[in-house]
Image (cartoon, rainbow, N blue to C red):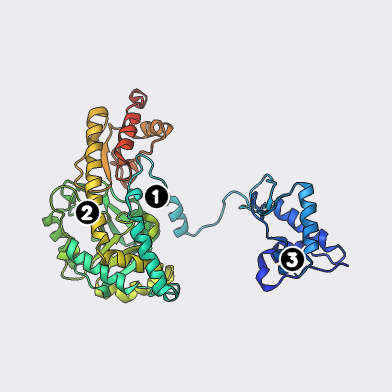
Amino acid sequence: MTRPIHANPGAKLWLNLFEQAQHTGRPIREQLCQALRQAIRSHALAYGMRLPASRTLASDLGVSRITVEAAYAQLEAEGYIHRHVGKGSFVAQQFAGSSTKPAHAQPSSARLSARGQRLVDGGGCRDPRLPTAFAAGSPDLRVFPHEIWRRLLNQQLRRNQTALLGYGDPQGYLPLREAIASYLQQARGVKASAEQVLVLTSSQQALHLLGSLLLDAGDTVWLEEPGYRGARTAFDAAGARLLPVAVDQDGLCPHATLPPPRLIYLTPSHQYPTGSTLSLPRRLALLQLARQHGSWIIEDDYDSEFHYDGRPVSSLQGLDDSGQVIYLGTFSKALFPSLRLAYVVLPPALIDAATTARTVYDGHSSQLLQAVCADFIEQGHFAAHLRYQRKLYRSRRDLLLDEINRKLKPLLTPLPSPGGLQLLTLLPDGLEAPLSQQASALGLVTPGLRGLYGGQEAKDGWLLGFAALSAEEIRQAVATLANIDRSKGK
């Protein structure tokens, strides 16, 4: 007896695999064998993958279990699968080729839009996936209070699992917005209410959203020089005219010949990457300029939680009386990167527009994680974790400075670093590229300074991350770095 295979609605995956093998003139056992052989050869069934139990597959396909057992036995005899009593049947063959790229795929020659090409040409924004020395900008996830987070997560699942698994408010989970507003008022002097807070997935998403919302092609944007590459990428993709503005020990230093900006991007509390703080006279001057020209200011307070020397400077937004400043923050460094939660504090005039724009991106962030984060803040765990991190990271910064001064001078010249998760060190001109290649060959990551410039007067240096490294890892990494051949860079 022969008949085509029919799958019930719960077996769509297997129906897709068997569609090309359905020939009414062939025994059903051969249809099964042919479909499974083809799936394994094309990597639709990957090496080591467990196949459904014969009873389950027979039920899904509406065929006899004896037929499925016969097909499995045939494939085992041919070497395609292996079977273990009590464990199941597994794919035993691995064929050359890739299952992730169609056979007809060619090297990329796609016709991109002008905006898309600018995004690609900008190189993207990639963060380190592992705490490798000296990858910059990563917290130490080993010291995160995992048990507390797990307990809060389980509590939320027990209390609100149905509600938190649905679609959420695009502006963000209200208890989290309330917790963020309260924290920012107390810790950063931000003028914030829950109604002004917009919860997003990341700072980078916020920059792209704000660029799309506030900039037209050709609009002028002032950027710090050197400065955060992700901001440059976001505003360049929006078609803006980017003007690098030099930074000195008092922060952004604009000159009178610059054209008025539509938008100014700043990291005023801890300038990225130099570590300087925008002085009060310059803060007041920039706020006056923004009022005069109707400019927006984005204040990216990316790591203000980590200030080690003296008292942290309050936010620029707290000085703003005219609604020109948009305040941006993230939990990626204070908690953990995969949380994917950031926030902006919006002037009242932008709340509705920005919330609507957020629906166009990805709708909302995870409600469940927002709820857990709100509990984490409200119950005092966030403040306690920050206190511990500050003490720990300060000791690691001090150790890195000591190790550099003992083993890497005069090659490296550290700049003052009152806070943050990385240390900026200057190199002699022309040495960044060749020494970075040597460091990479030794298994070290040395993020370069030169790529953070948008103009022509770039300097050589490294931005060395220390927060995610233990004391011993810092000592070993510096000792390894001291082995580079400095003469090869000349």
Q: Position of residue 217 (x, y in %)?
A: 37, 63
Q: Is residue 24 above or below residue 139?
A: below
Amino acid carrying mark 3 in the image: Ala
Residue located 22% across and 53% down the image: 387
Circle nearer the N terminus (2, 1): 1
Q: Position of residue 166 (x, y in %)?
A: 45, 74
Q: Position of residue 237 (x, y in %)?
A: 40, 58
Q: Is residue 240 above or below residue 137?
A: below
- Residue named by callout 3: 58
Q: Choose top left, top right, bottom left or bottom right for residue 169.
A: bottom left
- Residue named by callout 2: 387
Residue located 23% across and 34% down the image: 413
Q: Where is residue 151 in the image (x, y as percent from the top left)?
A: 36, 63
Label 3: how many Cα within 10 Å (few below 14, some 14–19, many 20+): some
Quadrant occupied by the N terminus? bottom right
The CA distance from mark 2 to mark 3 is: 59 Å
Q: In this view, does 373 lie to the left or right of 293?
A: right
Assign a secondary structure to mark 3. Answer: helix
In this view of the protein, which residue sits in the foreground, 449 or 215?
449
Residue located 78% across and 59% down the image: 69
User: Can residue 266 be seen in the rendering of this structure?
Assistant: no
Count of numbered circles in the view:
3
> Hey, which residue is sitting farthest left in the picture?
281
Q: Choose top left, top right, bottom left or bottom right for residue 464.
A: top left
- Which mark is in front, 2 or 3? 3
In this view of the protein, which residue sits in the foreground, 217 or 233?
233
- Residue named by callout 1: 127
Label 2: how many Cα within 10 Å (few below 14, some 14–19, many 20+): few
User: Can residue 312 be seen in the rendering of this structure?
Assistant: yes
Per the rendering, the mark at residue 256 is none
